[in-house]
């Protein structure tokens, strides 16, 4: 399985409102809803720089380990310092 690399968009990166909307939808989704995971994968795809390509990124996201998931969630919610290229 390819290692997933994430990149945090800067203040000048287009798509800010789209990313914020996806983040809000994910955070508002009940924890016991199966839709929560679909929303998470959709949200994280905006941050994946490797593997390239929507299909490969989606497949890699669904195959994340718990540690990778925790790091990705921390990255996008800015709850902790996470190396964005791990």
Image (cartoon, rainbow, N blue to C red):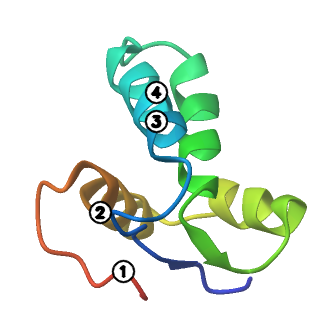
Cα–Cα gap, marks 4 and 3: 6 Å
User: Is residue 12 rendered to the left or right of residue 18?
Assistant: left
Cα–Cα gap, marks 2 and 4: 16 Å
* Residue in view at x 64 percent, y 31 percent: 38
Q: Secondary structure at mark 4?
A: helix
Cα–Cα gap, marks 4 and 1: 21 Å
User: Is residue 71 rendered to the left or right of residue 68?
Assistant: left
Cα–Cα gap, marks 1 and 2: 7 Å
**Where is mark 2, residue-wise?**
75
User: Is residue 47 rendered to the left or right of residue 78?
Assistant: right
* Residue in view at x 33 percent, y 25 percent: 27
In the image, residue 22 sits, relative to residue 66, either above or below, namely: above
Mark 2 in CB contact with mark 4 (< 8 angstroms): no
For marks 1 and 2, the one nearer the N-term is: 2
Q: Secondary structure at mark 2?
A: helix
The label on residue 17 is 3
- Category of crowding for the residue at label 2, using alpha-carbon neighbours closer than 10 angstroms: few (below 14), some (14–19), many (at least 20): many
Q: Secondary structure at mark 3?
A: helix
- Category of crowding for the residue at label 4, using alpha-carbon neighbours closer than 10 angstroms: few (below 14), some (14–19), many (at least 20): few
- Category of crowding for the residue at label 3, using alpha-carbon neighbours closer than 10 angstroms: few (below 14), some (14–19), many (at least 20): few
In the rendering, at what x and y percent does residue 61 appear? Answer: 64, 59
**Count of picture labels:** 4
**Where is mark 1, residue-wise?**
84
**Where is mark 4, residue-wise?**
21
In the image, residue 4 sits, relative to residue 58, either above or below, namely: below
């Amino acid at each position: 399985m390819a290692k997933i690399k994430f990149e945090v968009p800067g203040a000048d990166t287009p798509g800010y409102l789209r990313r914020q909307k996806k983040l809000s939808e994910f955070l508002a989704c009940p924890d016991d809803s199966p839709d929560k995971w679909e929303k998470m994968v959709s949200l994280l795809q905006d941050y994946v720089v490797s593997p390239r390509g929507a299909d490969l990124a989606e497949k890699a996201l669904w195959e994340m380990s718990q540690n990778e998931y925790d790091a990705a969630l921390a990255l996008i919610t800015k709850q902790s310092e996470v190396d964005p290229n791990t």
